[in-house]
Image (tube, rainbow, N blue to C red):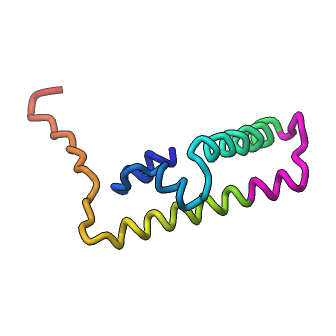
Amino acid sequence: VITDFLNRLSVDNPWAKLEVKMSMSASGIQVALDSFVAVQNECAHTGRTSSIPTPSEIRGYCDLVEKLASGMVEVLEERLNEAVFRPPPAVPTPSAPTAGTP
């Protein structure tokens, strides 16, 4: 989802750029996000969790979200400051049906 979002805004190699901004490997970011999303989904969909996160785990998730958001902002700011901004590719719109065709 993150790479799709950044790719739509013409950011090339988003994971490589986030690795630099977050000082984490792409696989490390993905593992941490997967862990966070798993806990969040369990709580959101069942109203409880099989393992209650410790305060330090919760702080870790908060730090992850903050680092990810800041990293994405920095990547996007750099993209906007580039000399040539390549707009996202145009998506063709469907043509209207001609009279008499379903």
Left/right placement of residue 83 relative to residue 52 reads: left
What residue do we see at 46% from left, 63% from top? Answer: 75
Q: Residue furthest left?
A: 99
Residue 5: x %, y % from top left:
45, 51
Q: Position of residue 78 (x, y in %)?
A: 41, 68
The magenta stretch is 47-62
Residue at point 28% right, 54% down? Answer: 88
Percent coordinates x, y for residue 92 in the rendering? 20, 44
Occupied quadrant, residue 40: top right
Q: Residue at x 18, y 26 (%)?
A: 102
Q: Is residue 101 above or below residue 17?
A: above
Q: Is residue 36 left or right of residue 51?
A: left
Q: Closest to the observer: 21 or 87?
A: 21
Residue 76 screen position, x and y as percent = 43, 64
Above or below, comparing residue 100 to residue 4 in the picture:
above
Mark count: 0
Residue closer to the observer: 91 or 65 = 65
Q: Nearer the viewer, residue 42 or 65?
A: 65
Residue located at (52% from left, 61% from top)? 72
Query: Magenta span has 55?
Result: yes
Question: Front-most of 11 and 46?
Answer: 11
Is 57 within the magenta? yes
